[in-house]
Amino acid sequence: MSHDVHIIGGGLAGSEAAWQLAKRGFKVRLSEMRGGGDSTPAHNGTGLAELVCSNSFRSDDHEKNAVGLLHHEMRGLDSLVMSAAAKAEVPAGSALAVDRDVFSAEVEERLSALPNLTIVRERIDHLPEAGLTIVATGPLTAAALAESIGTATGADSLAFFDAIAPIVYRDSVNMDVCWMASRWDKGETKDYINCPMNHEQYLAFHAALLAGEKTEFREWEANTPYFEGCMPIEVMAARGEDTLRFGPMKPVGLDNPHDATPEFPKGRWPYAVVQLRQDNKLGTLWNMVGFQTKLKHAEQVRLFRTIPGLENAEFARLGGLHRNTFLNSPELLDRQLRLKSAPHIRFAGQITGCEGYVESSAVGLLAGLMTAAELGGREWISPPRTTALGALLSHITGDAEADSYQPMNVNFGLFPPPPEDVKKKQRKEAYTARAKADFVPWKASL
Ligand SMILES: Cc1cc2nc3c(=O)[nH]c(=O)nc-3n(C[C@H](O)[C@H](O)[C@H](O)COP(=O)(O)OP(=O)(O)OC[C@H]3O[C@@H](n4cnc5c(N)ncnc54)[C@H](O)[C@@H]3O)c2cc1C
């Protein structure tokens, strides 16, 4: 065999695992089907680590936020995803957002420069019978391999759906109506384009969302649950008249300078707001934050052009619906992400049931480190549960209830609680301070 480990899938998790292994000197074969004539329903191009929907890695606050803490730990482990994100960063308030093309190109360039990594554009249809393997084929694993995984696990992989948000060309937005600002003027820059709605406009928009023509579910899709973090806007709207105003259309902290009064010289808050966030480095593309949808394309164009400021909006991409496949990991995988019934195979990324770009990359990073330990004949010590990496890994590999297992973002609910005498207001800082203290000796043990 010409390689030490075969990684299947060159998305976020597979790229991160390949980086961690190849830079340690192990020979890696990375098989990615895009670029070899295949694709998935959500990917647009052939680049490694393509971001299929939002361009955000979410909060970068490592003192009060669990995903920010995960960023911090990944940076501490020389994460390729985190360093490529730094290179591709675009303004997004306290969040870490990137130009997706710059990001993917950077990942690909860094991996291509590693002499002992071979990137092969090929689709793999069967789980290899021997040889250390990492399967990181993501929520849109190609059908034949998904079937092979189903056969090997003896359990049904669950398929369900989530939606992607539209992207608007910046120069088609009417800035006489919209304005740039971050909520509560946080950060030094004004990172979002805000499209204001009054009460009447909001009610009309809400009603139109409910009435709008949706992509029909096929019979086998009918009772599949959504990915909570990516719920279609019209599904959220159906939960109640004000649900959107407390969610993606929240107006609080957004003074509209086009609506200034003597009493509110900086401007009044609108009744509701649609926010656009920069999607590429050039600043030419902006995504509609939280506006993932399964409305039909023509309906999206018609309806979204009723949003004040978007009357003449041109769309670089419209929203859509997608499949998501993941394993019942707490039952099927051991604490090192290995298939209990075939321990030469590890799983990584979203297919393990973690949720989100950062989490998928983090699980890829861990799979890379675990495989490196195995190849190097070293004992693997798991990250402490008090760290973000440890909390996420423990959840996936056994702490979660197998019966009701659903994809999960990293959050403080997965961590052991801090001592009870820590005041409520200081609990987030207590989680992160403890994680940082426990991370250091664990890292030294690697
Ligand atoms: C439509 C959609 C929207 C999403 N939106 C967001 C979002 O906005 N924010 C967020 O944080 N998370 C989002 N997610 C969730 C998730 O974080 C991403 O899907 C993430 O890319 C998962 O990383 P991954 O490495 O596990 O899989 P991927 O990044 O999908 O990588 C898997 C790779 O494997 C390849 N592949 C598949 N089958 C084979 C095969 N048989 N042989 C060879 N190669 C194969 C694919 O081409 C792909 O490149 C979304 C998921 C979907 C499906």
Image: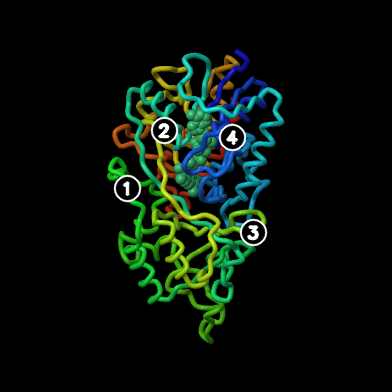
Element type at mark 2: helix
Give the amino acid type for the residue marked by disc 2 in the picture: Ile
Element type at mark 4: loop
Residue ID at (71%, 31%): 113
The residue that label 3 is drawn on is 283
Q: How far apart are the two marked residues, 1 and 3, measured between alpha carbons? A: 35 Å
Label whose residue precedes the other's in the sequence (2 or 1):
1
The x and y percentages for residue 324 are 41, 40
Give the amino acid type for the residue marked by disc 4 in the picture: Gly
Tag 1 near tag 3, CB within 8 Å: no
Instruction: Bin the neighbour count of mark 1 within 10 Å (Cα to Cα): few under 14, some 14-19, many 20 and up.
Output: few
Q: How far apart are the two marked residues, 2 and 1, measured between alpha carbons? A: 29 Å
As drawn, the residue found furthest toward the bottom would be: 262
Which quarter of the rendering shows the C terminus? top right
Tell us which disc is closer to us: 3 or 4.
Answer: 4
Q: Where residue 35 is drawn, which disc sits there?
A: 4
User: Is residue 410 in view?
Assistant: no
Tell us which disc is closer to us: 4 or 2.
Answer: 4
Q: Where residue 217 is drawn, which disc sits there?
A: 1
Label whose residue precedes the other's in the sequence (3 or 4):
4
The residue that label 2 is drawn on is 396
Tag 4 near tag 1, CB within 8 Å: no
